[in-house]
Amino acid sequence: MIIDELLNDVETVAIFGHVRPDGDCAGSTLAVYNYIQDNYPKIKADIFLEPFPKCYEVLRGASFAQKTFGPESNNGKPYDLAFLLDTPTFDRVGANGEACIKAAKKTCNIDHHISNPLNLCNTNVVEPNASSASEVLFFLLDANRISKETANCLYLGIVHDTGAFKFSCTSKRTMNVVGELIEKGVDFSKIINETYYTRTYRQTVVTGFIMQNCKMALNDKVVYSYITQEDIDKFQVPPVELHNVIDTIREVGGTEVALFLYPVNGKYKISLRSNYVVDVNKVANEFGGGGHMRAAGGDTDDVPEIAIPKILEVIAKQL
């Protein structure tokens, strides 16, 4: 298998995902980490992930994730091998990882974004038709050496990038992989409930506030909402814990596109979802972002009152 071949004669490994890790990013990176821990105990593996939702801590190894790569990492020496998961451009690499990846002796990019140029690393495995990076990764591992803990990580990644198997990216192959993971003893009920459907009390309250302020546009085909930094301070919910809000907005019946903006690091994060017609990846591209046909995102320096009309104008062209 490709991963095992790459791990031959390797002593140090660095693992990176994208900025603001979602379920697939956390799941795929932690799956690689756990696979190495289970099968290559002599390899020193470091995983670098920016802050992620607390609920992902259900995965083994999550507590070992380092928030950023620095000069002191690996005693200042280049890693023998660096993995980049679920990330289509160096602009999207999280945890300050670009320099580390470029300095590594061997590199591997595993992804499913159609925008991936296929030249980020020495080895590039990109399958745009796959549901998730976690699904792609499954076929690069030796199935007989996938532990329950590694399976939990892959399952979480697939669950989140398929919208709990609701998105159109879900295929027969996706479900076959899920079946294989269940046979590994994956905690499927716990993972899907605690990381996808369950919210803390504060998350529930702030989600209610956001939904109460939803508005409709473009003949009620678009539903949108946003939250300001002042609101976040009031509800005391960090931006990283707003990851599931867009999927709640998407539940408004009769709509084609859901749009949500929230502040992150001085900008507004744009989250987009669509149902059947609009390619939100193309919409996000207009704002320096990207993703998939039915789920994408980007960033803007504009405040919501200015950004939303611009985004609606782009959506209108497709509708």
Image (spheres, grey):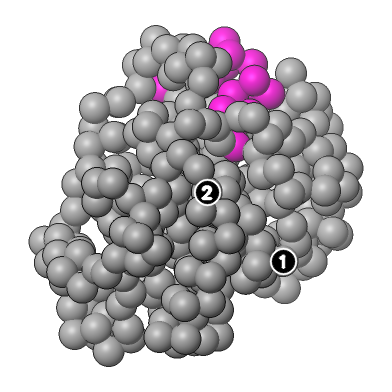
Left or right, 252 with respect to 61, comes to left
Judged by its main secondary structure, the magenta piece is: helix
The quadrant the N terminus occupies is top right
Residue 130, picture quadrant: top right
Residue 217, picture quadrant: bottom left
Q: Are marks 1 and 2 in contact (CB under 8 Å)?
A: no
Secondary structure under badge 1?
A: helix
Where is residue 175 drawn, in percent x and y? Answer: 45, 17
Dot 1 corresponds to which residue?
Answer: 91
Where is residue 45 drawn, in percent x and y? Answer: 63, 45
Q: Residue at x 27, y 80 (%)?
A: 232
Dot 2 corresponds to which residue?
Answer: 278
Identify the amino acid type marked 2. Answer: Val
Picture disc at residue 318:
none
Magenta residue span: 133-149
- Of circles 1 and 2, the one toward us is 2
Marks 1 and 2 sit apart, C-alpha to C-alpha, by 25 Å
Q: Residue at x 32, y 83 (%)?
A: 228
Q: Is residue 136 visible?
A: yes
Mark closer to the chain start, 1 or 2: 1
Residue 135 magenta:
yes
Indicate whether 260 appears above or below 255.
below
Residue 98, picture quadrant: bottom right
Q: Residue at x 24, y 51 (%)?
A: 252
Query: Is 200 or 131 nearer to us in this picture?
Result: 131
Query: Is 169 or 221 nearer to us in this picture?
Result: 221
Left or right, 111 with respect to 55, comes to right
Identify the amino acid type marked 1. Answer: Asp
